[in-house]
Image: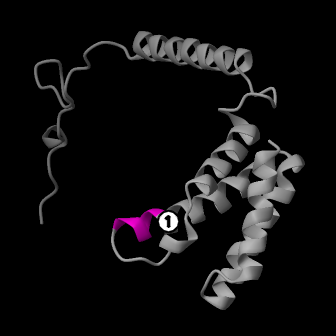
Amino acid sequence: MQPQPPDSAPTPPTAATPSAPPSHRPAGPLVAALAVGLLLGAGGVGAAWALGGDDGDTPGSGPTGDAHAACGALDGFDPAKYGAKGEDGVIALNRYAAAGTLAASAAAGDTRYKPLAEAIRRSQDRHLREFEFTAAVRKDLDKARSLCDDL
């Protein structure tokens, strides 16, 4: 095997033979503009949130809103339609479930709504054990509805 002459080494790329695609514009200004836009947007959202926060008395938001929504779902719930075939049964099932979920959310945010959440949960737990709306289940539903009347 013969040694190769020293001038046969590969030549480095030059301007005439590009090895990488040319870069377009520096990304710095684009990244800076994006960061400024995000900061301004976040600041606007934060200000709106702070100015329109839940003061506990607003029926449409926070725990108070959840409690009112739970009562609305419970108000539209008809135990006689629970388990019925068709859309009436589906509506009853979803309203009963929604009332429990919304009341639990309200209680998690404000302990004033804990009795409401507990009354609905008791009625749902009893219903799951008995598979029908017995007097005990209806008693808990009536208690929940009474608590709703006091909101």
Place residue 117 in its image quadrant. Answer: bottom right
> Residue at horizontal 79%, vertical 65%?
119
Residue that carries the numbered disc 1 in the rendered image: 92
Of residue 114 and residue 71, the one placed in the foreground of this image is 71
> Residue at horizontal 15%, vertical 37%?
7
Magenta stretch, overall SS = helix
Which residues are drawn in magenta? Answer: 87-91
Q: Position of residue 52 (x, y in %)?
A: 70, 19
Q: Counting other residues with Cα less than 10 Å from the Cα at mark 1, is it few (<14), some (14-19), or many (20 or more)?
A: many
Judged left or right of residue 122, residue 35 is left
> Residue at horizontal 45%, vertical 62%?
91
Question: Dividing the image into 4 quarters, which one contains the C terminus?
Answer: top right
Of residue 86 and residue 42, the one placed in the foreground of this image is 86
| SS type, badge 1 | helix
Query: How many labels, in total?
Result: 1
Q: Magenta stretch containing residue 89, yes or no?
A: yes
Q: Position of residue 51 (x, y in %)?
A: 72, 14
Applied colour scheme: one colour
